Image (cartoon, rainbow, N blue to C red):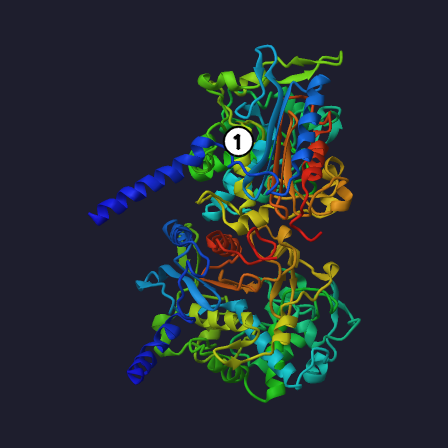
Amino acid sequence: MLNRIALFCLLLAPLPALASGLPQGDPAALGFAPDRLARIDAAMQRYVDEGKLAGMTIAIARDGKVAYEKSVGMADTAKGRPMTPDTLIRIYSMSKPVTAVAAMILVEEGRLHLTDKLGDILPEFKDTQVFESEGPDGVRTVPPKQPIRIFNLLTHTSGLSYPGDFDPTPVGRIYDKKDVFNAANTLAEMSRKTATIPLTDQPGHYHYGASIDILGRVIEVITGKPLDVFLKERIFEPLGMHDTMFVVPARLQDRFAELYTTGKDGTLAPLREGAGLGLYREDAKLVSGGGGLVSTVGDYMRFCQMMLNGGELGGVRILSPETVRLMTTGQIPADRRGNLPEHRPGSNMGLGFGVLEDLGASEMPGSVGTFGWAGAASTQFFIDPREKIVAVLMTQYMPSDTYSLRADLKDLTYQALVEPRDADAPGGSR
Amino acid sequence: MKKHWTGLFALLVAAAVGLGPAAAGGLPKGDAATLAFAPDRLARIDAAMQRYVDAGKLAGVTVAIARDGKLAYLHSAGMADREAGRPMAEDTMVRIYSMSKPITAVALMILVEEGKVHLADKLSDYLPEFADMKVQDGEGPDGLKTVPAERPIYVHDLLTHTSGLTYDDYENSPVSKLYKQANIFDPARSLADFSKLIASLPLAVQPGTVYNYGVSLDITGRLIEVVSGQSFGAFLKDNIFEPLGMKDTTFRVPAGKQARFAQLYKPDGKGGLQPMTGASYHARFAPDAVMESGGGGLVSTVDDYLRFCQMLLNGGELDGVRILAPKTVQLMTTGQLPPERRPFLARLMPGYDVGLGVAVLDDLGTSELPGSVGEFNWAGAANTFFFVDPREKVIAVLLTQLMPYGDPPLREDLKAWTYQAMTEAHHAE
């Protein structure tokens, strides 16, 4: 009898885990009001009905169990493919926390240190200068006051920049001119090109840019393996993230979502050029640790749950709890945070994640210590260690500042939570 | 047969639970000593209130103190209407003025929870009249000079009074003068027209800079109308007053309740009081008033306001009815502004930060009053006060009808009276 039950469990148990990332839980037992969770359906459906988004998925888990997972609308309207939890999504900058975890694996092994000078690992950065001004004679630069260290890459304080669409500055225009993110570049070539461009700011000051891509190249040099291979071996396979990848092979194209923007006529239109779209093709050479991953809601939930668990999931340890604690602790003094307060009020930078330090400044419900990030196609996630909650929002829409989806994910998740544990919340335990 | 009985039983329970507390009103009575209040010390509050009445400082006053959801103290002294010979009582209806603001803030957060509006949204996405605002820049030879607003007004600015909007009764404020000239609180004006009128006038300060107390919560009322598709009054009734059994909270006092409506008083200059007969103190609350002022237009009772406070103390729920989620109440009662952005509040209420629709105590020592960090409160122009202390699970409400605001020091009194009677603190500090 026991044998038959065990066999039955073996046959059935892996299926839900594969389908939804984490095991299904009972929402009420997890402290959520089912009628309030149903409001999330309605809020998502409004985005679709109003023609703002083609499709959308939200998943919420507590204590490692899924309390809510729902997809609405279409992954590809022209092909009539609905959005589902299986849909493959360009997660763009939500790649960064993954690459940061990969770097911290090497730090834990003693092969890399946060204090290591970037120029010692990637010699092309030994002489990189800092932008001062732009005149008729070209760009004037000054030497960096301190060298870029690995810590600076993980906190976006390297001074590295981004192409003009994301960074409309003179330095951003040089990134455009040098076509740094061309999919035909190898990561080694991308790194060498980037190193010839002046830094936007002195190392030590937050400036969002290509830091995590360069960190990807650091990982390659330290390990002697391509970044995609290292991530697959050390993160995706151990965590069962079977649908997370840089290149989408032909056999998976029918699960790959279309990317949308708002066209000139005000309706949704596919975005077919730019936006790093070449990165996902089978002939792409560039492996972008800062923005190149495709994933599913279930895979990303597993990644988040690993972080919430202090570096472990399903008996597989990726990082130690102390490393996770360091990664999710604010690292930059308030006067060096650049435009971070504008984009994420109340947050500081951890290593690869933003970390909420000042709830009152954040303009949305939450808990101090919550960490997360977002992607350029409007994807969002957060991990709340006080409430033991993980939440992921997937969609495919640019530009990402069009709708308040970061607020939506927080507002909608927390309005459904009726049994808080955060000591600062009414009814929470002190 | 069994099914039938179960159904009948459920109906009876629903009737008892649903109608019971609402019909009774307020909060259930508790035993003061069990709730850790000393009865002899509570009796001091009777005496202190009576002194104000006997001295002719207040016509009438009511104080209620609850702990753990139960009433530890409720007492009224003096008259609701001296001329009509009506005593102050627990069912007396009073103008709560700015104590309307926390209610309006809760109403907006209901819509935030539904995902229909976000605190970070631009106000002009919903109220287009607030696009391209001008800000006053001092008076010039041709009148008030203005400069363009340096950033849009966001919804969050309304709930934290950082929108740049002002009030009509500030001396030395040129925009305040414009508000007064425009008679902004004309009871005949709709909230839609009020919003357009305010948006046509310059802001007093740049949006998003400093705390500037003003009509932000009135504009929030209009925002609620546009987002919900309901009149503001109907939205409050459907989503707050009826669910919480706040049966006497209203913008307009109906004919049938006029006999419970208190008179408003002011000092007569001879050490006594006289009724305030000006139309503005009466027409705004008349059955035919149109304007529904979320910043200051509500009339309520001690019973009703206690229920509202208890809902907040419980993390958004009362008697099984959930209005907000605990994390939303947490956000509303968390300080939101750095000290340099709230000098006005620092003068008015030292030690307090700005929450959403309430002030939140973040520095007990600076406040010069007994209390607990995390306590939140607000007050009304007719010297009504409330505070909620989440650490001690205490609520206190003081209602009277006296203008102008601030004399006698009833905010200090309510704090002192409540905490001196409390014999056991729940909280370690």
Residue for badge 1: B303
Q: State the image quarter where residue A309 is shown.
A: bottom right
Residue A118 in view of the camera: yes
Q: Residue at x 65, y 59 (%)?
A: A357
Q: Position of residue A329 (x, y in %)?
A: 66, 67
> Residue A186 vs residue A282: left or right?
right
Chain ID of residue with mark 1 = B
Residue type at mark 1 is: Asp
Q: State the image quarter where residue B263 is shown.
A: top right
Mark 1 falls on what kind of element?
helix
Q: Residue at x 70, y 17 (%)?
A: B54
Residue that extends furthest to the left in the rendered view of this protein = B1
Taking depth in this image into account, of A299 and A167 the one nearest to the observer is A299
Taking depth in this image into account, of B364 and A208 the one nearest to the observer is B364
> Residue B170 vs residue B397: left or right?
right
Q: Position of residue B235 (x, y in %)?
A: 44, 35
Locate the N terminus of chain A and report the quarter of the image it occupies. Answer: bottom left
